[in-house]
């Protein structure tokens, strides 16, 4: 469960969903590699303000649900993760490097999506649009959308 992170001048709840595919979409994630990956992620969260809410692996890619702080951009987070995980997984599991012909662990691309704790895009859009308007206006606006007037 995400938590408010209290900083000196802000209180962020930033959640990101990352998907990182292995290089060439090679099948490299086994149960043993998964355990190492989770352990390394736990160590990363101790050093950096990156908290792993969930980690899910498939044979050729990894999903991360991460909570972080505004000082880390999504690009900075994924770059840090990919470099540390590659270095440590190659150390612990040299057989992975053989499957990848001695090259990189990750493909150059990744997927990232923001995740909201408080609602979907439409509900947030309506909330922001209706700021400062009276309840009467909001009821009138809703009734017009429903064609009641």
Image (spheres, helix red, strand yellow):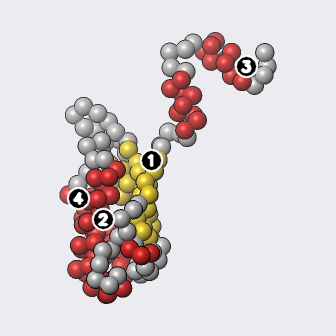
The residue sitting at 38% across, 44% down in the picture is 14
| Helix, strand or loop for disc 1 | strand
The residue sitting at 78% across, 22% down in the picture is 147
The residue at which mark 3 appears reads as 144
| Left or right of residue 61: residue 145 | right
| Helix, strand or loop for disc 4 | helix
Whether tag 1 and tag 3 are in contact, CB under 8 A, the answer is no
Residue at mark 2 to residue at mark 3: CA–CA distance: 50 Å
| Left or right of residue 41: residue 22 | right
The residue sitting at 50% across, 20% down in the picture is 131
Whether tag 2 and tag 3 are in contact, CB under 8 A, the answer is no
Q: Can residue 76 be seen in this view?
A: yes
Q: Say which label, 1 or 2, has the lower sequence index.
A: 2
118 w.r.t. 30: above or below: above
**Residue 29 place in picture, x, y as percent:** 41, 78
**Residue 115 place in picture, x, y as percent:** 47, 47
Q: Which mark is residue 82?
A: 2
Frontmost residue, 35 versus 69? 69
Whether tag 2 and tag 4 are in contact, CB under 8 A, the answer is no
119 w.r.t. 104: above or below: above
Residue at mark 1 to residue at mark 2: CA–CA distance: 19 Å
The residue sitting at 26% across, 59% down in the picture is 80
Residue at mark 1 to residue at mark 3: CA–CA distance: 32 Å
The residue at which mark 4 appears reads as 46
Frontmost residue, 75 versus 70? 75
Residue at mark 1 to residue at mark 4: CA–CA distance: 23 Å
Q: Residue 114 carries which label?
A: 1
| Left or right of residue 27: residue 105 | left
The picture quadrant where one finds residue 104 is: bottom left
**Residue 13 place in picture, x, y as percent:** 38, 42
**Residue 128 place in picture, x, y as percent:** 50, 26
């Amino acid at each position: 469960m995400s938590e408010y992170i209290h900083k000196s001048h802000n209180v962020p709840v930033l959640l990101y969903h990352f998907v990182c595919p292995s290089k060439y979409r090679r099948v490299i994630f086994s149960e043993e590699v998964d355990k190492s990956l989770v352990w390394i992620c736990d160590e990363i969260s101790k050093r950096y303000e990156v908290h792993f809410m969930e980690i899910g692996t498939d044979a050729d890619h990894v999903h991360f649900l991460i909570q972080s702080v505004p000082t880390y951009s999504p690009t900075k987070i994924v770059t840090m993760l990919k470099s540390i995980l590659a270095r440590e997984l190659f150390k612990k599991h040299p057989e992975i490097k053989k499957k990848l012909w001695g090259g990189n662990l990750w493909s150059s691309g990744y997927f990232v999506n923001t995740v909201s704790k408080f609602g979907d895009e439409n509900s947030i859009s309506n909330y922001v649009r209706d700021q400062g308007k009276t309840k009467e206006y909001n009821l009138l606006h809703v009734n017009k959308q429903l064609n009641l007037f």
